[in-house]
Image: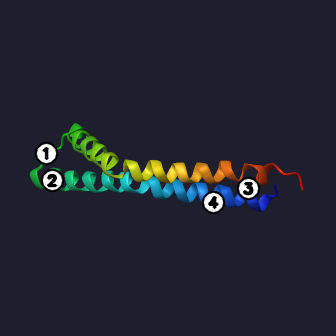
C-alpha cells in the first residue's frame, strides 16, 4: 500500500462523513435560524427554547435519512473490506 491509496481512502471517508452529516446539520441549522428569528420577533430571550425544536427536528431528520446514512456507511465499509487484500499486499 502506498501513500496515494491511503490518501484516496481518507479522502473518500471525509467526503462520506460530510455527505451523511449534512442532512442532520442542515436541519439543525434551519430550525435554529427559524427559532432565533421567532425569538427576535417576539422578544423572547429564553435560551432553552431552541433545544426542544432542534431535538425534535434532528430526530425527524434521523428518521427520514437514517436508512440512507446506514446504507452509505455500509457500502463504504463493504468496499474497504472487499479490497482489504489489495491494501495489505507488500509492494
Secondary structure found at label 1: loop
Q: How far, Cα to Cα, is label 4 from label 2?
A: 39 Å
Q: How far, Cα to Cα, is label 3 from label 2?
A: 47 Å
Measured from the top left, where is residue 37 in percent x and y? 19, 56
Of mark 3 and mark 1, the one earlier in the sequence is: 3
Of mark 4 and mark 1, the one earlier in the sequence is: 4
* Label 4 close to label 1 by CB (< 8 Å): no
Q: Nearer the viewer, residue 46 or 89?
A: 89
Of mark 3 and mark 2, the one earlier in the sequence is: 3
Of mark 3 and mark 4, the one earlier in the sequence is: 3
Q: How far, Cα to Cα, is label 1 from label 2?
A: 8 Å
The residue pinned by badge 4 equals 11
Of mark 4 and mark 2, the one earlier in the sequence is: 4
Measured from the top left, where is residue 30 in percent x and y? 28, 57
* Label 1 close to label 2 by CB (< 8 Å): yes
* x 13%, y 45%: residue: 44
- Crowding around mark 4 (Cα neighbors within 10 Å: few <14, some 14 to 19, many 20+) is few
* Label 3 close to label 2 by CB (< 8 Å): no
The residue pinned by badge 3 equals 6
Q: Nearer the viewer, mark 4 or mark 2?
A: 4
Q: Residue furthest left?
A: 42
* x 12%, y 49%: residue: 43
Measured from the top left, where is residue 7 in percent x and y? 71, 59
Secondary structure found at label 4: helix
* Label 4 close to label 2 by CB (< 8 Å): no
The residue pinned by badge 2 equals 38
The residue pinned by badge 1 equals 44
Secondary structure found at label 2: helix
Amino acid at each position: 500500500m502506498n501513500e496515494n491509496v491511503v490518501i484516496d481512502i481518507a479522502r473518500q471517508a471525509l467526503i462520506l462523513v460530510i455527505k451523511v452529516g449534512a442532512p442532520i446539520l442542515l436541519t439543525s441549522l434551519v430550525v435554529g435560524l427559524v427559532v432565533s428569528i421567532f425569538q427576535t420577533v417576539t422578544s423572547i430571550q429564553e435560551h432553552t427554547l431552541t433545544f426542544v425544536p432542534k431535538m425534535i427536528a434532528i430526530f425527524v431528520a434521523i428518521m427520514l435519512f437514517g436508512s440512507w446514512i446506514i446504507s452509505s456507511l455500509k457500502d463504504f465499509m463493504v468496499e474497504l473490506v472487499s479490497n482489504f487484500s489489495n491494501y495489505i499486499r507488500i509492494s
